[in-house]
Amino acid sequence: QVDETNVALYITEPPCGILPPGSTRELVVTRVAKEDAPELEDMQCKDKYFVWSCVVTQDVNVSDLIRYMPEKERKELPIVFMETSSNELIQFDPPELSFPLLPNQRVLSSTKIVNITDQYISFRVCTKKSNSARYNANPSEGILPPLSTQVILVTRIAEEKELEGTQCNGKFLVWNGIVTEDAKASDVIDNMSETKCTGFLILLKQ
């Protein structure tokens, strides 16, 4: 449960469930700041994030829980920010993808994703459907430890006759965000938008 007055959206996976006796369940929470949210003056977060709980019988279904969430049986989970030195989390080396201009062929390029922070950074490759070619990245997602580097191999597969010249309008984007040390790449929620991605140039060489 989250407050409607929060300055950010909190997407939780799973949003609800049933815990067997003595069991543990991990919640993956993505925080998405609203466009009109005021800037934070300090590390104090006033958003409210609640976890509702109660004892149920063994035959209760998860879908039954949504209709029954009294406020007196909920606990607040504090939200704490981790300080980072910059809004920029990753860099690319080299800063562009360079491919030979070979129409109707698969061509390969590579770049390094560099974590320039002292935080754990999750990344996922995201390309535009409007691209004139398909781009397959390996790996396409992962977790970068602090100040680490990951080589990304990118295969470009042209879907139509290439335009003359080296100007490429395709977009290769990498979504990235700070995660906790114990996060897994498979836990990263597919909540990507172009505004939250870091992109870099695609160059076609004759």
Image: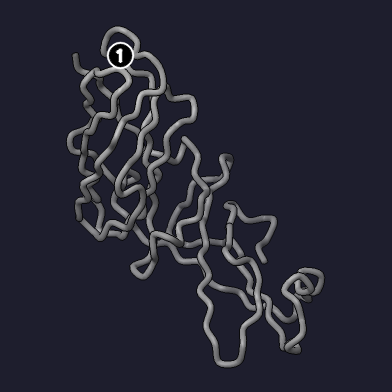
Answer above or below: position of 36 versus 206: below
Height in image: 153 above or below 204?
below
Q: Position of residue 188 (x, y in %)?
A: 45, 57
Looking at the picture, which amino acid does disc 1 mark? Gln
Question: Split into 4 quadrants, where in the image is the C terminus?
Answer: top left
The residue at 30%/7% (across/down) is 164
**119 up-or-down from 130: above or below:** below
Tell me which corner region of the image, top left, top right, bottom left or bottom right, holds residue 37.
top right
Residue at the spot 46% in from the left edge and 66% down from the top edge: 80
Numbered disc 1: secondary structure: loop
Residue 42 found in image quarter: bottom left
Front residue of 16 and 106? 106
Position of the N terminus, as image quadrant, is bottom right
Q: Residues within 10 Å of mark 1 (few under 14, many from 20)?
A: few
Residue 136: name its quadrant.
Answer: top left
**149 sits to left or right of 133:** left
Most distant residue in the top direction:
164
**Residue 193, percent from left and from top:** 50, 39
Which residue is pictured at 31% across the width and 47% down the height?
89
Q: Is 33 on the left or on the right of 109, as rendered? A: right
Q: Which residue is mark 1?
A: 167
Image coordinates of residue 135 in percent, x first then y, are: 36, 34
